[in-house]
Amino acid sequence: SLFPHNVVLMPLGDDFRYDHDIEWDQQYRNYKRLFDYINSNPRYNTQVVFGTLSDYFKEVRNRMRDFKTLKGDFFVYADIFSEGRPAYWSGYFTTRPYWKILDRELEAELRSAEILYTMSLNRVRTMGYNSTLKILERDFEKLQRARQSLGLFQHHDAITGTSKAFVMHDYALKMFEALQDCISVQGYALQTLLT
């Protein structure tokens, strides 16, 4: 058996399935024939039944009272000897949590900066402040760089933390710089809006 409880769940269906009576009737009849055939054959040593998720878990509980408990994130990744020494990650979703937090903070600060920038740009254009408009054009470049840094970190080896250490360090520097740019854009935009 693949499972210690010898009970297998086999979900049937898909998105947008069983939305017509005829489809349910046809599927039920087909599976019923298969179930009857399997259940009537003793050499298969198998009993197949229709059931719900509740039925499945009830049957599993009847066969197993104690379950082993594992904690943590065990999605293991290895990049062995790529730099002359082994590099392992056990914790695809939890490796380098500081970078994951930094990513979310940058995302939030960037969104705030974009909103404030848009509001201040609209005000400056409406009021005809040409000198301020030039500063806002410079700030737009900061927003572009921040977007690029955030986008770069969405790479499958970046956000997961499975890049090499020197690459992760480079990502962090780019995100720190992007954070500073976002805060700078927010500050100037607020100043523009409050004057």
Image: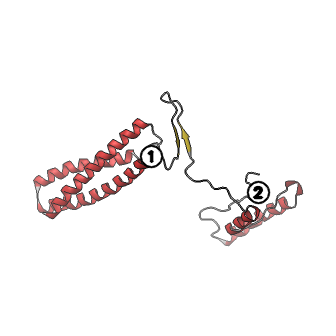
- Give the residue furthest to the top: 84
Q: Is residue 143 visible?
A: no
Residue 138 lies left or right of residue 53; in this view the side is left
| For residue 159, above or below residue 125 | above
Determine whether, in the image, residue 121 is placed left or right of residue 59.
left
Q: Are marks 2 and 1 in contact (CB under 8 Å)?
A: no
Identify the disc placed on residue 186: none
Q: Residue at x 85, y 54 (%)?
A: 44
Q: Amino acid at mark 2?
A: Asn
**Which residue sits at x=72%, y=63%?**
65
Is 164 situated above or below 14? above
Percent coordinates x, y for residue 157 in the rendering? 46, 42
Disc 1 crowd rating (10 Å Cα; few below 14, some 14-19, many 20+) is some
Which residue lies under the disc numbered 2? 6
Closer to the camera, 159 or 15?
Answer: 159
Q: Position of residue 29 (x, y in %)?
A: 77, 66
Compared across the picture, whether 191 is left or right of 16 comes to left
Looking at the image, is mark 2 or mark 1 earlier in the sequence? 2
Residue sitting nearer the eye, 170 or 153? 170
List x then y, in percent, for residue 185: 23, 53
The residue that disc 1 covers is 96
Q: Quadrant of the C terminus?
A: bottom left
The furthest residue to the bottom = 21
Identified at 88% across, 54% down, the residue is 43
Q: Report the mark closest to the observer, 2 or 1.
A: 1
Amino acid type, residue under disc 1 in the picture: Arg
